Structure formats: C-alpha cells, structure tokens
Amino acid sequence: MNTKRLYIYQLITKLLPPTRCYKFKASMLRWCGAIVGNNVRVVSSAKIIGDMELIFGDNVFVGHDTLIFGTAGSTINIGSNIIIGSRVIIVTGSHEFTPNGPCIEGPGVCADVTICSGAAISTGSIVLPGKTINNMAHVAAGSVVTHDVPAYTRVAGVPARVIKNFKEQ
C-alpha cells in the first residue's frame, strides 16, 4: 500500500459520515493500493495503517474504530462474506523477546494474517500476526487469537480457545 495515499485516505474519511459513502471509500482504498472486492463497507472511524498488501474479498464489513495495521512485507487477506466488528485489532507485526539485549523486546518480525470466507470477528477482539481464521469461524467478543482458528468453530477468551464446533450440531 502507498502509505502517503493511505494517510490522505484517513484524512478524507474522517470528514465522511461513518456508515455512508462505502463505494467512495472502497475506490479510495484501491487508489491506495489495496485489492478491494464488491460491496466492501469500511466505517469511517476504522484505521488502516502500514505498508502491507491488503486484500478484501466481496461483501466485507469493517466496524467502528477497527485497526488494521500491517508491516512492510506482510499481507492481510480478508476473504469474502466477512464481518469484522467494532474495535477489532488486526496486526502483522510483533517482536522477538529475548533477555540477551538492552531490552526484553528484540528485533521486529512480521507474519501474514488470513481471514477466510464466511468468518466473523466480534467486538474488541485481537488477531495476532501469523494467524489464520478459517472458513465460517467465529471469534467471540474480547478474544485474543494466538493460534489458528479451525473452520466451523467459535473461539473465545484470552487466549482464544475453541468453545463450540458448529459441525457437531
């Protein structure tokens, strides 16, 4: 993504109604370098920051105050028919932790995040670098995704654990 254009995108979307002008916002994201499918709805207060590759499938909703933050060289791939609730955080960057330097937090690392088709991430959840949320999975509100989420399951908690398997119903 072009970070200078993304900065302009952030400035302009602050002036737009939160839940309107979705086609314009999608075209602005394309201008910034994102791959954006049809019917992508990003609320104006959502923040998209970083020099990552960003891919949105069709029929995606990104809620209020969501943060999508990608580091250079990483990819955030959001499939089709996805709902991302308010105040969700999706990041691709972290640090190695080692007591061998001047600070416990060592060199930076990055890893791709993938959210597969039909998944939903509820309010206040955090998706850490390198994680995949598989097809038709649900991340319950306030969860921290520290491992890949299996398809057709609900995960909840800190760290997120499987609490329901939808295929067993």
Image (tube, helix red, strand yellow):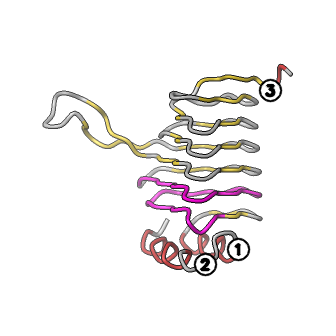
Asked whether 139 or 108 is in front, the reply is: 139
Amino acid type at mark 1? Arg
* Residue 168 horizontal/vertical position (percent): 83, 19
Contact, CB < 8 Å: mark 1 with mark 2?
Answer: yes
* Residue 142 horizontal/vertical position (percent): 56, 38
- Residue found at x 61% / y 29%: 156
Quarter holding the C terminus? top right
Neighbour class for label 2 at 10 Å: few (<14), some, many (≥20)?
some
How many dots with numbers? 3
Residue 114, compared with residue 160, is above or below; it is below
- Residue found at x 69% / y 69%: 19
* Residue 129 horizontal/vertical position (percent): 47, 40
Residue 129's tag is: none
Give the side of residue 48 with respect to residue 152, left or right. left
Magenta region, residue range: 42-71
Q: Earlier in the sequence, mark 3 or mark 2?
A: 2
Amino acid type at mark 2? Leu
Residue 16's tag is: 2
- Residue found at x 71% / y 74%: 23
* Residue located beneath label 1 in the image: 20
Contact, CB < 8 Å: mark 3 with mark 2?
Answer: no
* Residue located beneath label 3 in the image: 166
Contact, CB < 8 Å: mark 3 with mark 1?
Answer: no
